[in-house]
Amino acid sequence: MLKNKKNNKEFYQHGLSTGIGIGLTVGTIAGAAISYWYKKNQTLSADDILEKVKADFLQEGPIEGSWIHFKKEPLQKFAVKSKIYTGGISRIEDGELAQYEFVADAYTGSIIDIYRL
């Protein structure tokens, strides 16, 4: 009887440690997958994108003004779908005001298009 109780105790301790190990492993994998998915689907703020564009323009000289739409808009080119921000920069070039509009990817901040008005 005593030997049987000892075997049962060892069996339950082994089962408990195995269960905890499996639970921790599954929890870690699930947490990593959720974190990856969240970061992949998170967009940048409009302010961050505007600051990036302004910094790029400031490398070529001073700017007079800037703006950005805070509402993201959907964009689809062929099979590629994304969300974008639109905005603009104005600066003095050759003594005259030059205005530019840009389209930036909301996920990466990359400039998709920029054109002078």
Image: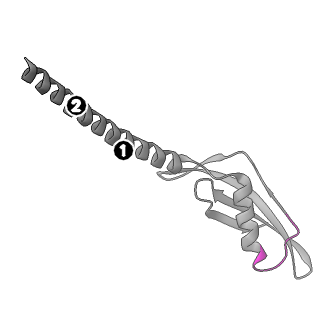
Outermost residue, bottom direction?
Answer: 94
Name the amino acid, label 2.
Gln
Instruction: Find residue 98 and report its horizontal and vertical position in percent.
Output: 84, 71
Whichever of labels 1 and 2 marks the residue nearer the N terminus, that label is: 2
Q: Disc 1 or disc 2, which is closer to the eye?
A: 2
Report the span colored magenta.
58-65
Answer whether residue 74 is magenta in the image. Answer: no
Closer to us: 83 or 50: 50
Q: Is residue 94 left or right of residue 83?
A: right
> In the figure, 98 relative to 110: above or below?
below
Label annotation for residue 29: 1
**Most frequent secondary structure within the magenta stretch:** loop
Q: Please tell me in which quadrant of the rendered image residue 56 appears.
A: bottom right
Label annotation for residue 13: 2
Answer whether residue 62 is magenta in the image. Answer: yes
Q: Secondary structure at mark 2?
A: helix
> In the figure, 74 relative to 95: above or below?
above
Q: Is residue 101 left or right of residue 27?
A: right
Q: Secondary structure at mark 1?
A: helix
Residue drawn at point x = 66 percent, y = 46 percent: 73
Q: Please tell me in which quadrant of the rendered image residue 30 appears.
A: top left
Name the amino acid, label 1.
Ile
Q: Is residue 27 left or right of residue 104?
A: left
Q: Please tell me in which quadrant of the rendered image residue 95 appears.
A: bottom right
Q: CA distance from mark 1 to mark 2?
A: 24 Å
Residue drawn at point x = 46 percent, y = 49 percent: 36
Closer to us: 89 or 43: 43
Instruction: Find residue 93 and report its horizontal and vertical position in percent.
Output: 86, 79
Q: Is residue 45 left or right of residue 58?
A: left
